Image (cartoon, coloured by chain):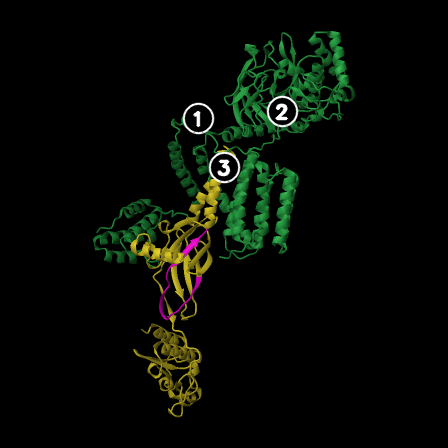
């Protein structure tokens, strides 16, 4: 109930009072924190501490006990100077980049946020959080510090990284200073892969007049050596006979690459994407050449992680 | 954030609690203090070996035994002493159920509060410095427990070191603000609620009862009772009697003040005008109401009364150090006209007891008749002839006067005064006992006199027809040095300590000087002193608004100064004025919507900016080119600062044209 009200109030504030929440709009990197966008409030302990300080002050004044008053004032003044140190912890901290290795929807994505702070003292115990995810880290001066935050993912496509809160209770845990970081960064989330999918649609090689070949299995003929050909492809024996360098020429991969066709999967849309994703992963893991035919066009043939990543990206970004 | 408290940090909290308790050892009942330290040891042992002992079946007995011990040692768990001791005990017991960071914070906050409680029991400079150090330690602990870090000693050591650095730095930076707030904070002219002294009598100094032997704990108490600054010459040593409670009633064991004797009109004094002297007394808190002015005071402070027998009593107990101006005459006579009832009071005796002393007095009376002076001389001669002055007299039996006069014949001022007064009353001469101090040591550096608790003294006054009350100090008949040299150490070799003379005395004087400054500048600073201080800088009107305004203005300055001082090292500024100016230039462009990317060089950025801001394009390009030249080019050197300076100025003056 309370949380819902709070949420509604925040939404209202963002809509109606953009000046207050100005820094919550997405903004391009790098984001450099400065005093005007760092906010500070007492912690719960800070409130208790304030009550205690009031009691100390009133007691000391009542009994006209000057050493006690001096102590209470020293504690109060130390606390107040502590506010400045609290804010100074975040001041001039810079968020330089946000990156992540793509994951499949449903898996947590590990965001890498690179922070930097110029010369000066270290910034210990900074806390970065988004919703329930939280990470502590220490920034050393003049060094890039990396904070990794694992966020849950639910759907494929571009995922805006959203708002982070960078905060700290340094030095005394009496106040907390925070600033909201909303970098204009999206990370890619691949579609979830279907579990228990049928095997790759390789088909019967004899029926199709083709044989599934693995790279290096077979070669079609010979051709002249061109600079840049790998030495292990040189056919030494024929070369010796011909007295010039001949290179083995391999079969055209297109002819026997597996076709992963969107139109051959009789499922509804997301399930189809999910199955194709599974097949792409499988083909990648088996180093198998394949082609991916999607409604918008055809990818490949190709093989290996780079091509697979391209295919997964296309799948992720399907409308 | 993990909320659990690992054992290393728990250990730090235990250490803090121990530090806090150390500052209270001087007033906590010893047994109770020992018990609290034992509890600390138990909790430390529990943490060290990770013994699970925190269940309720342990905590309840611990609480009950602590409470029981408190009642046994301090009398009750309420009142100033009992309540404070109870709070200390609860803090220690809280350790037994502290498993989380929140608990540790509560303990730390309570420890801060308990440090302040300590000032109800003493306000000395050393104690204040100690408690301020403990307060800094509290902040250190708050820092350490607010850090989320892997457990273990190496990490904790790093946290502790950083915490020490940070807390000391922040606390040092807080000093200007503290001083300003201390001066300007509005003081209450009257307390909101009563002062926290206990109903029972205070511990230190002289009380309004006297029994031979009771003062003995004062001999070893070298703390100052009060300090005196004379206007002009100090009176001669033999006249340095500091008059305290006057005791009239004797019940055979103990002298006390009669309850009926409160309303006598002020003493009628005939003072020798050449001996009238003015002086300031800086009184240590005694928790009693007596002042100890020089015998004989001529007037009383505003909140005190002077009674017919020359006692100055404050209306409220002296719980805080007070400075007070007095006027006394050290050569004086009482008005010889007897006041009604005075003679009866001065002759009051128990019906029985001490028969030999009564017989002796009756014998003198029979021999000398109405010549009271002769009886007095007889008694003094007896003391001088046969008695010995010692601080460790043999114990007395039931008839204390008889025992002293005829058996032990050794004692100190209380014994002599008590026996002498008894003899006089037996001889039908009104007599009374005056307690107070005698002597004092001059502090050359500070130009004032210190009277210590060890200078406590008791003497007598007898009523002589036609002369009024006359001071007779029987101790002077036995040990005249005690009176003339003005200090106990002079009278007794055994009482002399190493620091009474030589270099030790020198250092002691120095320390006492500092302590006195502390008293005057800090402890005694009240609404009146505040007014005086602020009037000196021209603030005549001492309203709440003026004080609040001063507190705000100067407090803000102090806060800014402290924050600046302590943050200076944290983010060092750019030293090169050219870079500073270029950053300013970038800020202006940023306000126009152009932010320089981290990987963008000045020239590329300048070109981009120029294309976006055509009105200022030429200026941007020109400034950027010159900046690059000065910063990176061939001429980039400090040899010719003029173009750099000019460029810096132009960069600062740059405005985006719309």
* Colour used to depict chain B in the structure image: green
Residue A31 position, x and y percent, is 36, 56
Horizontal placement of B573 versus B649: left or right? right
Mark 2 Cα shell of 10 Å, populated few (<14), some (14-19), many (≥20): some
Name the foreground residue: A272 vs A300: A272
| Distance Cα–Cα, label 3 vs label 2 | 30 Å
- Inspect this view and state whether residue B162 appears: no
Q: Which residue is mark 1?
A: B532
Q: Which residue is mark 3?
A: A59
- Quadrant in the picture for residue A14: bottom left
- x, y percent for residue A146: 44, 60
- Tell me how far mark 3 sits from mark 1, CA to CA: 24 Å
Q: Residue at x 44, y 38 (%)?
A: B177
Q: Are marks 3 and 1 in contact (CB under 8 Å)?
A: no
Q: Nearer the viewer, residue A75 or B418?
A: B418
Vertical placement of A112 versus B639: above or below? below
The residue at which mark 2 appears reads as: B208
Decide which of tag 2 and tag 1 comes sooner along the chain: 2
Q: Which residues are magenta?
A: A148-169
Dot 1: within a 10 Å radius of its alpha carbon, few (fewer than 14), some, or many (20 or more) residues? some
**Disc 3 chain ID:** A
């Amino acid at each position: 109930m309370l949380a819902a009200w709070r949420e509604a109030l925040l939404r209202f504030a963002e809509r109606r009072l953009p000046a207050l929440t100005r820094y919550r709009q997405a903004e391009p990197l790098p984001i450099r924190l400065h005093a005007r966008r760092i906010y500070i409030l007492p912690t719960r302990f800070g409130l208790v501490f304030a009550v205690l300080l009031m009691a100390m002050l009133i007691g000391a004044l009542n009994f006209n006990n000057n050493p006690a008053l001096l102590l209470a004032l020293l504690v109060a003044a130390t606390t107040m100077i502590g506010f400045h140190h609290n804010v100074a912890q975040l001041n001039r901290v810079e968020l330089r980049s946000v990156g992540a290795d793509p994951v499949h929807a449903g898996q947590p994505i590990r965001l890498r946020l690179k922070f930097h702070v110029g010369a000066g003292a270290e910034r210990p115990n900074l806390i970065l959080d988004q919703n329930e995810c939280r990470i502590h880290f220490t920034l050393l001066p003049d060094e890039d510090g990396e904070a990794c935050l694992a966020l849950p993912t639910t759907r494929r496509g571009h995922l805006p990284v959203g708002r982070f809160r960078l905060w700290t209770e340094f030095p005394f845990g009496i106040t907390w200073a925070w600033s909201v970081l909303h970098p204009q960064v999206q990370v890619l989330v691949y579609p979830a892969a279907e579990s228990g999918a049928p095997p790759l649609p390789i088909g019967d090689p004899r029926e199709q007049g083709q044989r599934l070949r693995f790279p290096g299995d077979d070669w079609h003929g010979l051709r002249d050596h061109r600079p840049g050909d790998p030495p292990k492809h040189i056919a030494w024996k024929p070369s010796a006979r011909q007295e010039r360098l001949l290179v083995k020429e391999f079969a055209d991969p297109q002819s026997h690459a597996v076709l992963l066709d969107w139109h051959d999967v009789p499922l509804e849309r997301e399930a189809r994407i999910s199955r194709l994703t599974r097949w792409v992963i499988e083909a990648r893991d088996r180093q198998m050449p394949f082609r991916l035919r999607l409604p918008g066009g055809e990818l490949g043939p190709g093989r290996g992680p780079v091509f697979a990543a391209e295919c997964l990206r296309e799948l992720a970004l399907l409308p | 954030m993990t909320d659990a408290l690992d054992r290393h940090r728990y250990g730090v909290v235990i250490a803090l609690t121990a530090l806090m308790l150390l500052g209270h050892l001087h007033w906590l009942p010893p047994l109770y203090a020992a018990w609290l330290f034992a509890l600390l040891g138990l909790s430390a042992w529990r943490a060290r070996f990770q013994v699970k002992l925190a269940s309720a079946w342990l905590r309840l007995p611990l609480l009950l035994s602590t409470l029981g011990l408190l009642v046994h040692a301090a009398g009750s768990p309420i009142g100033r002493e009992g309540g404070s001791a109870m709070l200390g005990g609860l803090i220690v017991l809280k350790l037994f159920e502290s498993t989380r960071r929140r608990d540790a914070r509560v303990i730390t906050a309570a420890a801060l509060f308990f440090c302040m409680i300590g000032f109800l029991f003493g306000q000395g400079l050393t104690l204040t410095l100690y408690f301020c150090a403990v307060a800094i330690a509290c902040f250190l602990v708050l820092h350490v427990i607010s850090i989320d870090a892997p457990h273990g000693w190496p990490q904790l050591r790093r946290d502790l070191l950083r915490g020490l650095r940070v807390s000391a730095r922040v606390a040092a930076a807080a000093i200007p603000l503290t001083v300003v707030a201390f001066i300007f904070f509005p003081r209450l002219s009257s307390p909101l609620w009563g002062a926290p002294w206990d109903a029972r009598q205070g511990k230190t100094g002289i009380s309004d009862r006297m029994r031979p032997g009771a003062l003995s704990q004062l001999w070893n108490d070298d703390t100052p009772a009060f300090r005196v600054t004379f206007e002009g010459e100090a009176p001669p040593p033999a006249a340095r009697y500091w008059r305290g409670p006057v005791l009239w009633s004797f019940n055979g064991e103990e002298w006390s003040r009669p309850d009926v004797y409160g309303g006598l009109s002020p003493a009628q004094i005939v003072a020798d005008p050449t001996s009238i002297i003015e002086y300031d007394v800086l009184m240590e808190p005694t928790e009693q109401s007596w002042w100890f002015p020089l015998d004989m005071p001529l007037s009383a402070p505003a909140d005190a009364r002077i009674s017919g027998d020359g006692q100055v009593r404050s209306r409220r107990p002296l719980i805080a150090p007070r400075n007070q101006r007095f006027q006394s005459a050290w050569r004086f006579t009482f008005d010889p006209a007897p006041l009604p009832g005075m003679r009866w009071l001065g002759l009051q005796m128990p019906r029985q007891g001490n028969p030999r002393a009564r017989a002796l007095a009756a014998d003198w009376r029979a021999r000398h008749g109405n010549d009271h002076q002769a009886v007095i001389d007889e008694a003094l001669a007896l003391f001088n002839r046969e008695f010995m002055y010692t601080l460790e007299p043999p114990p007395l039996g039931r008839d204390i006067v008889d025992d002293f006069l005829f058996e032990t014949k050794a004692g100190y001022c209380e014994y002599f005064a008590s026996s002498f007064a008894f003899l006089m009353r037996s001889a039908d001469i009104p007599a009374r006992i005056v307690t107070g101090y005698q002597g004092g040591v001059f502090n050359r550096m500070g130009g004032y006199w210190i009277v210590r608790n060890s200078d406590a003294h008791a003497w007598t006054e007898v009523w002589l027809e036609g002369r009024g009350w006359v001071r007779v100090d029987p101790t002077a008949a036995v040990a005249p040095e005690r009176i003339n040299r003005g200090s106990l150490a002079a009278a007794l070799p055994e009482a002399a300590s190493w620091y009474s003379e030589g270099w030790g005395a020198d250092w002691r004087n120095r320390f006492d000087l500092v302590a006195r400054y502390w008293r005057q500048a800090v402890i005694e600073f009240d609404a009146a002193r505040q007014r005086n201080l602020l009037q000196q800088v021209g603030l005549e009107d001492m309203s709440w608004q003026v004080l609040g305004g001063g507190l705000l203005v100067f407090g803000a300055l102090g806060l800014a100064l402290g924050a600046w001082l302590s943050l200076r090292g944290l983010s060092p500024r750019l030293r090169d004025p050219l870079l500073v100016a270029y950053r300013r230039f970038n800020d202006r462009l940023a306000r126009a919507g152009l932010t320089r990317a981290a990987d963008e060089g000045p020239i590329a950025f300048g070109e981009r900016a120029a294309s976006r801001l055509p009105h200022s394009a030429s200026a941007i390009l020109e400034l950027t080119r010159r900046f690059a030249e000065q910063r990176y080019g061939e001429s980039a050197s400090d040899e010719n600062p003029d173009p750099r300076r000019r460029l810096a100025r132009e960069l600062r003056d740059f405005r985006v044209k719309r």
